[in-house]
Amino acid sequence: MSSEGSELGKAMLEFHEAMDRHRRFVRETSRCRTCAYFVAKVAQRGSSMEEPEPDPVQGILGRCLRRAPQEFGHPITYETAWCGEYERGEALP
């Protein structure tokens, strides 16, 4: 019986390690930059505004179009953020 318990314990440990690897993979790859709802901020044509400089740590600034705009528009986010409602796809125009 102890060998069965040992094997079960080993299998559970392997399962939890695999789940941890999966969670890390999802956190590292499911970022706003590859989300279908992320739109990077760009300067308007003919505007006196300059193209925004990417943050050296967080990257490009943009907006999340996942939900309807709120009082001050769509939420502002960086390309390296993630929210749990990630959907891989082509970026919106």
Image (cartoon, grey):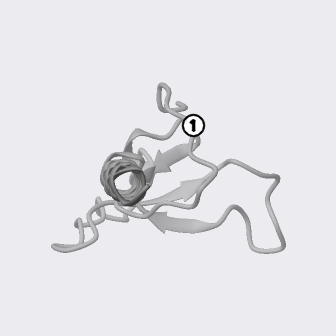
Residue 37 occupies quadrant: top right
For this rendering, which residue is in front, 25 or 84?
25
In the rendered view, does 64 fall on the left or right side of 79?
Answer: right
Quick one: SS at disc 1?
loop
Inspect this view and state whether residue 74 appears: yes
Q: As displayed, is residue 87 above or below residue 42?
A: above
Residue 15 position within the rendered picture, expressed as x and y whole percent measured from the top left: 40, 49
For this rendering, which residue is in front, 68 or 10?
10
Q: Which residue shows up at 29% across the image and 63% down it?
A: 50
Q: Which residue shows up at 66% across the image and 48% down it?
A: 65
Identity of the residue furthest to the front in this view = 1
Q: Which residue is mark 1?
A: 87
Q: Which residue shows up at 43% across the image and 64% down it?
A: 81
For this rendering, which residue is in front, 66 or 61?
66
Inspect this view and state whether residue 79 appears: no
Give the amino acid type for the residue marked by disc 1 in the picture: Glu
Q: Which residue shows up at 44% across the image and 51% down it?
A: 32
Quadrant where the N terminus sits is: bottom left
Residue 83 position within the rendered picture, expressed as x and y whole percent measured from the top left: 57, 61
Identity of the residue furthest to the left in this view = 56
Question: Within 10 Å of the Cα at label 1, are there few (<14), some (14-19), or many (20+) other Cα atoms?
Answer: some
Residue 69 position within the rendered picture, expressed as x and y whole percent measured from the top left: 79, 59
Tally the marks.
1
Residue 70 position within the rendered picture, expressed as x and y whole percent measured from the top left: 82, 67
Identity of the residue furthest to the top in this view = 90
Q: As displayed, is residue 82 above or below residue 35?
A: below
Residue 5 occupies quadrant: bottom left
